């Protein structure tokens, strides 16, 4: 679904309502008081109703005779909608819920992107290669600039999906980008993240060489690195940082092999 354009009073009303619902201020099952909302948001009833139609199309609200307009159960929401994903990351989420969503998106990426890299290696054109190369070069140039680094990373993953020449896979860009952009903003602002350029260049090289297996393997390695970067910033659910663990918890058991202690972030 095409992302909703945030323009004017109508767009602002849609986003204000969505964030109240996603943040739990208006809970699932609640019947909306349209008169009160109209006053709180300072909009006309017509603008409010039009905004609710947008949310209804995304599965978030519904209107029934005698019951009125109400918030549907989360299970009914179109969670793959680009706007619904973006709204969850842009406000109203608790850190625990946000981390859970990032983990879910990491699992989706682990399923989609290695297969996409394989297809890209088989089907890429010279134009696709140029887009991938441009993105990797931009990542290197803007490594110290989080904003531009995020844009370059998004451009790379967008170009990779485009290189599959599968119109359904290309549409997955909207699902992946919301979570990837949020993750990147967190990671690229940290001085402790790994250099992302070599991992992306490995994917590019495999796609250039038309080596599907190498492309898939390189993408899995890239996603593993992305998971490690996020894990460094993502302490336990109680909010403590990873380096705050007690000394006897910091070192792995001597009898434990390296595979048992390796982080699985990004998978």
Image (cartoon, rainbow, N blue to C red):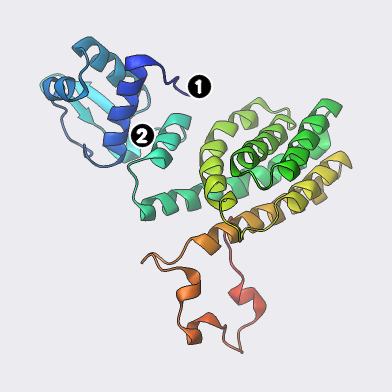
Q: Quick check: marks 2 and 1 in contact, CB under 8 Å?
A: no
In the rendered view, tell whether residue 117 sits above or below residue 240: above
| Residue farthest along the bottom direction in this orientation | 254
In this view of the protein, which residue sits in the foreground, 176 or 36? 36
In this view of the protein, which residue sits in the foreground, 110 or 36? 36
From the viewer's perspective, tell me whether residue 240 is left or right of residue 67: right
In the rendered view, tell whether residue 35 sits above or below residue 216: above
Q: Which residue is mark 2?
A: 77
For the C terminus, the quadrant is bottom right
Q: Earlier in the sequence, mark 2 or mark 1?
A: 1
**Residue 267 shows up from this direction:** no
Q: CA distance from mark 2 to mark 1?
A: 16 Å
From the viewer's perspective, tell me whether residue 243 is left or right of residue 150: left
Name the residue at 84% across, 46% down: 206
In the rendered view, tell whether residue 186 sits above or below residue 1: below
In this view of the protein, which residue sits in the foreground, 8 or 72? 8
Name the residue at 78% across, 39% down: 137
Name the residue at 34% across, 28% down: 59
Q: Which residue is mark 1?
A: 2
In the rendered view, tell whether residue 182 sits above or below residue 159: below
| Residue farthest along the front direction in this orientation | 144
């Amino acid at each position: 679904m095409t992302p909703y354009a945030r323009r004017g009073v109508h767009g602002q009303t849609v986003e204000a309502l969505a964030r109240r619902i996603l943040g739990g201020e208006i809970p699932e099952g609640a019947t909306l008081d349209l008169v009160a909302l109209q006053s709180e948001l300072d909009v006309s009833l017509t603008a409010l109703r039009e905004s609710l139609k947008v949310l209804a199309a995304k599965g978030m609200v519904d209107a029934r005779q005698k019951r009125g307009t109400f918030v549907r159960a989360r299970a009914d929401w179109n969670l793959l909608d680009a706007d619904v994903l973006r709204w969850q990351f842009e406000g109203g989420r608790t850190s625990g819920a946000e981390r859970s969503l990032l983990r879910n998106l990491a699992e989706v990426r682990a399923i989609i992107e290695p297969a996409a890299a394989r297809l890209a290696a088989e089907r890429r054109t010279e134009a696709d290669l140029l887009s991938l190369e441009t993105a990797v070069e931009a990542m290197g140039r803007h490594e110290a600039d989080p904003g531009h680094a995020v844009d370059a990373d998004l451009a790379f993953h967008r170009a990779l999906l485009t290189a599959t020449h599968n119109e359904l896979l290309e549409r997955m860009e909207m699902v992946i980008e919301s979570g990837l952009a949020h993750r990147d903003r967190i990671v690229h602002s940290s001085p402790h993240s790994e250099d992302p350029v070599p991992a992306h260049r490995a994917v590019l090289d495999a796609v250039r060489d038309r080596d599907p297996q190498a492309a898939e393997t390189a993408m899995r390695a890239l996603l593993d690195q992305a998971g490690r970067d996020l894990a460094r910033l993502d302490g336990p659910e109680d909010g403590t940082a990873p380096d705050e663990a007690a000394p006897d918890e910091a070192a792995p058991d001597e009898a434990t092999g390296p595979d048992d202690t390796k982080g699985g972030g990004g998978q």
